[in-house]
């Protein structure tokens, strides 16, 4: 048995998220589509892939990482092209590596970087309609940048976690958060050792409230202390989010 | 009667081109979709719109310009939002202006700029799969830039016109052609007083042949003189092309 680690990009627009859900028989997920492609190229049944990040419906990836086990003898460097030849064009593998049997795409991830894209054009950019959140209103980006700095570090991020989430701990470490402007776009890049459910989308929703002047930048500190989701901003739309990179 | 000039952007992926074709009853075109939207907001029947560039199926626009006549009293600055409210999200108007009754979006156009995007990534960028032509092979961009310079000026471009085209003259003036590289992408920007049918896609297809070393850059000069489509390169795919700007 070989354990294979692979990197892929996907446009999440037409998928019900990464993860195969019990009972969602007919809904296409990225994981399900990849597993079907693996079955086709390896002629093996029941290969299960584990992804580093379980992206939601509509969320994209440029740097998702997976692992799976197979008995196939396909040479390792042939895996990306073999999978791409049977996958739809909105999923593309670009790297494969044979790893030790204890490697785990999710548990071994030391840090992940996501990017959230905001489109400030007066009229939404048609080419970004599935890849950015349109924010036609005035935003004080300097204030948003200041607020973002208060998120850096190791905190209990319960206020930034979708209600009803069952995890052992809400403590995560945000290593970097960087807002940059390019033309009409604002990119919010966030690197952390891990993320709670909807954490980035709630962070972005809160930064937008601050950028509109509804809360001062220092509100972030109070919000972290409060551990109360209801005090944070709304969850920003999925389509602006993209998993950029995973570090092991 | 008012004559209105408007600017729009569209993602051409899901349309059978700009122009309403006789007998193509059920196929959605951008023109047809815009005319339906105009009928909805003006409650007027039979408004016909004229576009500056009749883009092919799969070709995109950031700066298409149209004109139409209407008796509607909708204030001019309300037109973009009114149309956007009834249009699908892959068509977006962003400018409207009342013009004199003799203005003509196509005939009055002094120059148009198109951009063609080439994706040189080893694996196609999933986010550009509908907006770029994937060219995974080696390209000598310096040679392509040299070849492009021979196209500038007033020439008979019959060699770069799809066969069977019926036009009065094949003479056009290319004012500027500029190749630029950004990451894995090459942009080919071309400005001319007008374009023949498939002209840019044949130019790009020929530049690719030159970039791969199949012909020397000076071949362009011979090709222009030959006035023979069969001697030029293949027609590059529609999806890489975008109408950027029209100057009046």
Image: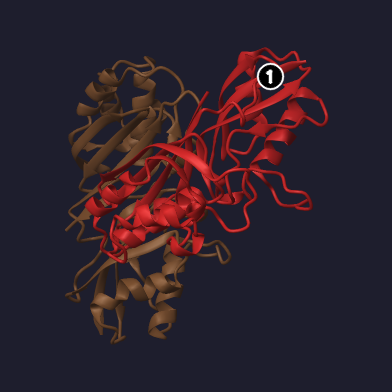
Chain colours: A brown, B red
Choose top left, top right, bottom left or bottom right for residue B120: bottom left
Q: Is residue A191 above or below residue A233?
A: below
Which quarter shows the N terminus of chain A? bottom left
- Tell me if I can see residue A183 in this picture: yes
- Tell me if I can see residue B124 in this picture: no
Q: Is residue A184 above or below residue A114?
A: above
Q: Provide residue A103's location: percent of width, then percent of height.
A: 20, 69
Q: Provide residue B159's location: percent of width, then percent of height.
A: 48, 55
Which quarter shows the C terminus of chain A? bottom left
- Counting every numbered tag in the picture gives 1
* Crowd around label 1: few <14 · some 14–19 · many ≥20 (10 Å): few
> Which residue ends up furthest to the right in the rendered image?
B45
Q: For the point 17% across and 54% down, which residue is it? A: A110
A189 on left or right of B83 = left
Residue occupied by mark 1: B102
Q: For the point 27% across and 48% down, which residue is it? A: B145
Q: Provide residue B89's location: percent of width, then percent of height.
A: 58, 38
Q: For the point 20% across and 27% down, which residue is it? A: A149
B134 on left or right of B71 = left
Element under disc 1: loop
Q: Provide residue A193's location: percent of width, then percent of height.
A: 20, 48
B60 on left or right of A243 = right
> Which residue ends up furthest to the front in the rendered image?
B225
Q: For the point 47% across and 42% down, which residue is it? A: B242
B46 on left or right of B61 = right
Q: Foreground residue, B182 or B235?
A: B235
Which chain is home to disc 1? B
């Amino acid at each position: 048995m070989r354990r294979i680690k692979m990197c892929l990009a996907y446009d999440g627009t037409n998928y019900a998220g990464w993860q195969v859900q019990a009972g969602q028989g007919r809904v296409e997920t990225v994981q399900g589509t990849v597993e079907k492609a693996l079955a086709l190229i390896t002629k093996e049944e029941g290969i299960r892939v584990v992804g580093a990040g379980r992206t939601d419906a509509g969320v994209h990836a440029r740097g998702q990482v997976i692992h799976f086990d197979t008995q196939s003898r396909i040479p390792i460097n042939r895996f990306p092209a073999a999978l791409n030849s049977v996958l739809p064009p909105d999923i593309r593998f670009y790297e494969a590596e044979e790893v030790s049997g204890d490697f785990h795409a999710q548990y071994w991830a030391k840090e992940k970087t996501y990017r959230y894209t905001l489109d400030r054009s007066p009229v939404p950019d048609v080419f970004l309609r599935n890849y950015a959140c349109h924010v036609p209103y005035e935003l004080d980006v300097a204030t948003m940048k200041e607020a973002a700095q208060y998120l850096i570090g190791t905190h209990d991020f319960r206020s930034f976690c979708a209600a009803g989430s069952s995890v052992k701990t809400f403590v995560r470490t945000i290593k970097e958060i960087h807002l940059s402007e390019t033309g009409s776009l604002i990119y919010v890049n966030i690197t952390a050792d891990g993320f709670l459910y909807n954490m980035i989308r709630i962070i972005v929703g809160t930064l937008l409230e601050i950028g509109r002047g509804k809360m001062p930048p220092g509100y972030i500190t109070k919000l972290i202390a409060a551990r109360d989701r209801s005090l944070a901003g709304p969850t920003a739309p999925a389509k602006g989010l993209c998993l950029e990179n995973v570090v092991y």
